[in-house]
Amino acid sequence: MFRDGLDRALAPYLGSQAVNSYYEDWDVVENRYKDKYKFYLEEVVQEDGSEEEIQAVTGHSFHGQFKGSLTFYYFDHRIQEETGGEKDLSDALQYAWEKTLKGDYECEEELLIEALHHTVEEGIDFKEKVRGYLLGDHPEYEHKFLDLSDYLDIDPDDYLD
């Protein structure tokens, strides 16, 4: 469905969700997302708000996989918030998959944006979030970090220098 980086960003998110659904006593937020977010704040975000590209201890590019996982976590929670819990990221992915099967897309970035917008119908401009946080090519996001404090109960000020 996605190529050129978005698939590498989505796979860790879906993997974490799958593990969480299989092991009832395992908390994905505590065991995956909070640790990734703390690492992001402590190691990746610089004093001016820009981000340094680094390798995680697993050898993976933080931006290539881990930031994508955090960004999809953000998308999922924003969708749930906007729809009162009636929809989530899986609804957007189903829409994107159906468009993919029909061959109705030209650009994976645009497909993702369309799928996210279709899921919430209105209220959130996902275009800037996809381009800025996920793909890193939106000028307004050059010195802004991904703020997940509302979803992970972590105060960025406790970790940022």
Image (cartoon, helix red, strand yellow):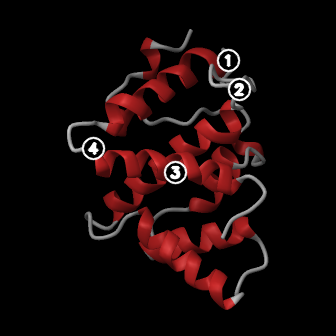
Residue pointed to by mark 3:
72
Marks 2 and 3, the one that precedes in the sequence? 2
Number of residues whose C-alpha sits closer than 10 Å to that of mark 4, classed few (under 14), some (14–19) or many (20 or more): few
Q: CA distance from mark 2 to mark 3?
A: 20 Å
Say whether marks 3 and 4 touch (CB < 8 Å).
no
**Amino acid bearing label 2:** Ser
Q: Nearer the viewer, mark 3 or mark 4?
A: 4
Depth check, front residue: 72 or 7: 7
Residue pointed to by mark 2:
50
Residue pointed to by mark 1:
46
Q: Residue at x 65, y 48 (%)?
A: 134
Q: Residue at x 57, y 25 (%)?
A: 40
Marks 3 and 4, the one that precedes in the sequence? 4
Q: CA distance from mark 3 to mark 1?
A: 22 Å
Say whether marks 1 and 2 touch (CB < 8 Å).
yes
Measured as percent of width and height from the top left, residue 71 is found at 54, 46
Q: Residue furthest front?
A: 22
Residue pointed to by mark 4:
23
Q: Give above or below for 49 relative to 95.
A: above
